[in-house]
Amino acid sequence: MVAQEEFDHVALAGEVDPYAIVRGLREQCPVAHSSQYGGFYAFTRFEDVWNAALDTAAWSSAENGATIPRYSPINLLPIECDPPDHSVYRRMFLPLMSRSALAPLESRMLEVVNDLLDEVIERGECDLVGDVLFPMATVGLSHLYGLDPEQTEKIERSAVNALKLGGPEAAMPLFMAFAELVGQRRAQPGEDIPSMLIAARVDGEPIPEQDLIGACVSVFSAGFDTVVSACAHSFDLLESNPDQRAWLIEDPSRIPNAMEELLRYVSPLPGLARTATADLEVGDCKIPKGDRAMLMFLAANHDPEQYPEPEKLQLDRNASKHVAFGAGPHRCLGAPLGRLELEAALRVVLTRIPDYTIPDRSKVVRVGGVTRTVTSLPISFTPGPRLKPPAANVG
């Protein structure tokens, strides 16, 4: 059991079994205080996390940001601002990121995943993250950002390096890449996120350059790392639960509901930070104004009061109230894109390489940080035929 004063949510994200750690913490002290990163509280009960996420007046995302420690040199909009400003920025993204707006992308993502799998399926082995999931996520985001192939490759490389290296310095090339993209869109606007933000006005004024770049990075990062992490851990879970995998393969129409249980279990974003705007009390714990707290989504999703037998994967469970994408006004903007890509990956992989295995778990590379990052997931499977000749692939 980890002593509460030593609890490190950053390291937790890179653990093979973070569930045992948060279970021990919840049993020891549901509202724990850690001395790490300057000190913070950790909420581990579903009810406490849910209530704090909905109460933006008491718990601020703008003051001190949404991560502990701070990873961004600038505020990342809309996640690091509070209502009413948050509502204004969030509404800007909805025309491009709603479920209905993304519907035309569904068939495209299935085609992309099939194309990526074509490149490895005859070998009988691949790195599922490097060969399939990273490029899949990049293609989805290139649609929203209007990226050409050269820009897509550059930004994917910067994003992957930031994940592997970690820390604010590693993220600087990603910020610079988006600063360059914003400059290009000022000269040649398109129908994409940067162009939309450039054209937007808040109280009659354009969005400041720094905030504009931060918003681009924020949404891209959420749609890249979080999606890849969700997919990678989901395939890991299914490999470890062969009965559940067989049940899903038996009837692919079960995938949409099963995804919610996978997302609950995995919780690719273990938590986000808030700052108390007044002296507050959570449970029996008094939290002074200005102190910070981590809303531990992973712990909430494994709270037995909300989900009986939380560490048992039950793909027919009703897990729709999970907080894998957060909750309340700050619920992840990219949730519709994340679900779309996870569904595409599950459908294609379970259809074409249903017998995949993870032959050596010591070679799975996990990285601690804001998300449960997986940068390498080597798998083996029975070789199969391509769907298209090499020249025909568009992925």
Image (cartoon, grey):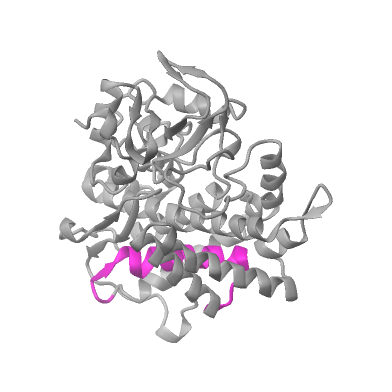
| Residue sticking out furthest to the bottom | 391
Relative to 238, is 274 on the left or the right?
A: right
| Residue plotted at (47% across, 34% down) | 320
Relative to 276, is 198 on the left or the right?
A: right
**Horizontal and vertical percent for residue 81?**
62, 42
Magenta includes 142? yes
Image quarter of the N terminus: top left
Magenta includes 215? no
**Residue 161 location, quadrant:** bottom left
Residue 393 visible to the viewer: yes
**Residue 131 location, quadrant:** bottom left
Relative to 7, is 140 on the left or the right?
A: right
**Horizontal and vertical percent for residue 155?**
50, 70
Relative to 211, is 348 on the left or the right?
A: left
Q: Nearer the viewer, residue 175 or 289?
A: 289
Is 78 placed above or below 124 here?
above
| Residue plotted at (61% across, 55% down) | 215
| Residue sticking out furthest to the top | 284
Residue 111 visible to the viewer: no
**Horizontal and vertical percent for residue 21?**
25, 34
**Horizontal and vertical percent for residue 379?**
23, 63
Is 249 placed above or below 273 here?
below
* Magenta residues, dominant SS class: helix
Q: Nearer the viewer, residue 275 or 232?
A: 275
| Residue plotted at (37% across, 35% down) | 316
Q: Which residues are magenta?
A: 122-149
| Residue plotted at (35% across, 32% down) | 299
**Residue 330 location, quadrant:** top right
Q: Nearer the viewer, residue 203 or 238?
A: 203
